[in-house]
Image (spheres, rainbow, N blue to C red):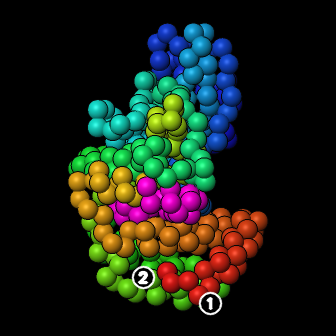
Amino acid sequence: MPARNPLVLAALASVAVPGLVPVAARAQPAGGGGSIETGGDPEGPADVDVAEVEDELGRRWVVRAPRTPAAAALLEQEWRFLGTLTGRLPFSVPLVAGTVPLAEGGRAGVHRALEGRPIAPSSLRPGPGLAAALGRALAAIHDLPTRLAEDAELPVYTAAEYRRRRLAEVDRAAGTGHVPPGLLARWERALEEVGAWRFTPCVVHGDLAAENVLVNQAKIGAVVEWGQVRVADPADDLAWLVAEAPEAATESVLEAYAHTRQDAPDRDLVRRARLSGELAVARWLLHGVTTGEENVVGDAVSMLAELEASVAGVPW
């Protein structure tokens, strides 16, 4: 079905939340489609209409309405999971304040817009400030009980299954003929090193990027866009940080992370995080090939060439 107008979404919000009287609405990009910089899944659900609505009291709300049955099912999973997080995390998450059934199936959901500005990884400074707070926030996510994801019927992988998933991605990318040979050999070496994949799966956000981590008063105020949650490799949630933050700041994040986590991080965590960021470009390529978007394929091919040049001679 075609995208809904923001005014239609505002009307849905007024029904979902008693007392919400909209005075303004604007469209927002649909979340859950993944981030190429972070290792998120670019083939994730994008068939969701999203709008920010302001009510007569000056409060801001976000309304999300699925366009397809698959998107509706994924939203329900996400809402079930988020509903179990009250009091478990040191920051805010989007909690549904109300829903309304849609004539075409599924439900639209409404939550308060969370305060904060996107974190700037390149501006992180080492030490006990924001970098350490980010490390503690990541640890809190990864220490969530895995049963929360299981009960929400979210994907759950063993370490061996997740390595096989990565192998399958590399095989598919190789099949396109667009991956430079040197880069392909690097990825194959990394995935053949079985010892580097002996990690303990945990709950991961799955789509962490600067725009999804909100800073409020020099603290991690909120984390949004939970549509890719799964039990998998904790390295996936570090890919964006390793790629974008200064090395000294990354070390401060990881120090606080290791100090806070209930289980000690495995020794190959950072190596897999770097690899996760690299493989995100392969997933971007596969997305373009699958959807027939030649501009995406061209963009991915350029990114792969740049990536091969930047990692030439560098151990994975």
Q: Quadrant of residue 75?
A: top left
Q: Which mark is drawn over residue 181?
A: 1
Give the vertical position of 50 relative to 110 (above or below). Answer: below
181 or 274: nearer the viewer: 274
Is residue 55 shown left or right of residue 114? right
Percent coordinates x, y for residue 168 in the rendering? 46, 78
Residue pictured at 57% horizontal, 9% vertical: 57
Indicate the position of residue 76 as horizontal and vertical percent values.
Answer: 40, 40
The amino acid sitting under disc 2 is Leu
Q: How many marks are shown on the rendered structure? A: 2
Q: Of the residues under marks 1 and 2, which one precedes in the sequence?
A: 1
Query: Image height check: is 77 above or below 291?
Result: above
Instruction: State which region is magenta.
Output: 229-252
**Counting other residues with Cα less than 10 Å from the Cα at mark 1, is it few (<14), some (14-19), or many (20 or more)?**
few
Query: Residue, x 23% and y 59% (percent of image)?
Result: 263
- Percent x, y of residue 27: 67, 33
